[in-house]
Image (tube, rainbow, N blue to C red):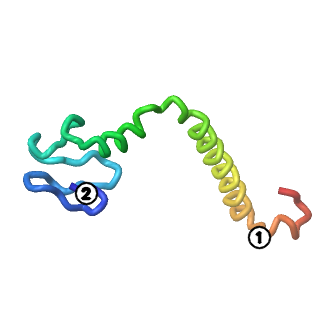
Amino acid sequence: PDPAAGSASAGASAPGHLFEPYDVGPLEAVWSYDQLTPAEKETADLGRDASGWEPSQVRRVEAVKAAVRRQAAVLAQRELGLGDLGATGVVP
C-alpha cells in the first residue's frame, strides 16, 4: 500500500493521516527483509547505519530554533503595530 496516496491493499484500511501509522493488512501482505532482492536489500540498508546522522540532525534543530526566533520577532513586531523596524530606527 502507498500511505501517501491514501490507497490500501486488500484487507487493509486507508491511513487516517500521512504521519500516523497505517494498517498494512494481513501478515501475508507484509514483505520480510529476506524476501527482498539484493538490489532492494542494498537500498533498504542505506538507512540502517544512523551513526553519521547526528551532525545533520543538530543543524536541522538549530535551523528550526533560529526560524522560531525570527518568527517570534515578526509576530511581536506585528503585535506592536510596527510595520518596518528599519523605518523606526530599530536594528533587529
- Mark 1 Cα-neighbour bin, 10 Å: few <14, some 14–19, many ≥20: few
Tell me residue 86's x, y (percent). 86, 66
Residue under the point 51% across and 29% down: 51
The numbered mark, 2 or 1, whose residue comes first in the sequence reads 2
Dividing the picture into quarters, in which one does residue 6 lie? bottom left
- Would residue 81 appear left or right of 11 to someone viewing this image? right
Determine the residue positioned at 19% across, 39% down. 35
Q: Quadrant of the N terminus?
A: bottom left
Judging by the rendered image, the residue that carries numbered circle 2 is 2
What residue did someone put label 1 on?
A: 83
Mark identifier at residue 67: none
Query: Which amino acid, by three-letter code, is at mark 1?
Result: Gly
Apparent side of residue 17 relative to residue 51 in the rendered image (left or right) = left
Q: Amino acid at mark 2?
A: Asp
Residue at left 25%, top 57%? 2
**Element type at mark 2:** loop
Q: Position of residue 28 (x, y in %)?
A: 9, 42
